[in-house]
Structures are given as structure tokens and as C-alpha cells.
Amino acid sequence: MTTTKIKLSTIADVQFFVNTIMRFPFDIDLVSGRYIVDAKSIMGIYSLDLNNEIELRAHTEDAEELFAEIDKYIVK
């Protein structure tokens, strides 16, 4: 499993993010506090507190392509 922190600020960010990660065959979760949701679920993402950073958990050891695709959302 590979993790990073992301920030989704707008509705357009959420839509683009979900459309981008739908192409990856492995499971991807988002964690905010004690809540864990499927990152491929728009409704799940909207249930999180988007004012804070969100932990992304990619259930793969090879997440380089994923991170390159979502680089603008990764908190550095």
C-alpha cells in the first residue's frame, strides 16, 4: 500500500479526480479522520470534510503513474 496526502478544493476538482482514478485497476481509498471511503465514489468523497487534507491509500506498490496523474492535488 502506498499513501500520500491530497487536497480537493472544488466540485470540479472532485469530478476530475474521480474520472482520473477510475482508470486504475487497483483499490484506492480516501481517509479523513475515522472515515474511509472508496476514492472512486463521488458521493463517498462528498461525505468527507474537504476543508482538510485527505489521506489517499493506493492498494498497490506501483503508484507512480497514479501520483503523476493526480500531482496537482498532492500536498507537498
Image (tube, rainbow, N blue to C red):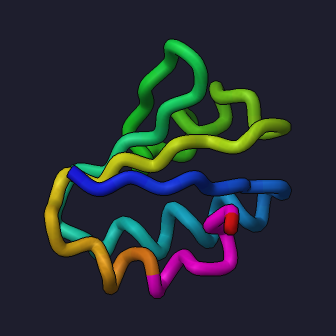
Q: Position of residue 18 (x, y in %)?
A: 51, 62
13 lies left or right of 39:
right
34 lies left or right of 53:
left
In which quarter of the view is residue 46 placed?
A: top right
In the figure, 74 relative to 5: above or below?
A: below
In which quarter of the view is residue 26 placed?
A: bottom left
Identify the image quadrant of the C terminus: bottom right
In the figure, 55 relative to 3: above or below?
A: above
Q: Main secondary structure of the magenta part?
A: helix
Which residue is farthest top? 34
In the figure, 46 relative to 24: above or below?
A: above
Q: Residue at x 77, y 66 (%)?
A: 12
Q: Residue at x 37, y 76 (%)?
A: 66
**Between residues 39 and 76, which one lies in front from this camera angle?**
76
Q: Position of residue 75 (x, y in %)?
A: 68, 62
Q: Residue at x 38, y 39 (%)?
A: 38
Q: Position of residue 27 (x, y in %)?
A: 22, 50
In which quarter of the view is residue 17 placed?
A: bottom right
**Between residues 52 and 25, which one lies in front from this camera angle?**
52
56 lies left or right of 15:
left
Count of numbered circles on the image: 0
Residues rendered magenta in the picture: 68-75
Q: Residue at x 51, y 13 (%)?
A: 34
- Residue 2 sits inside the magenta stretch: no
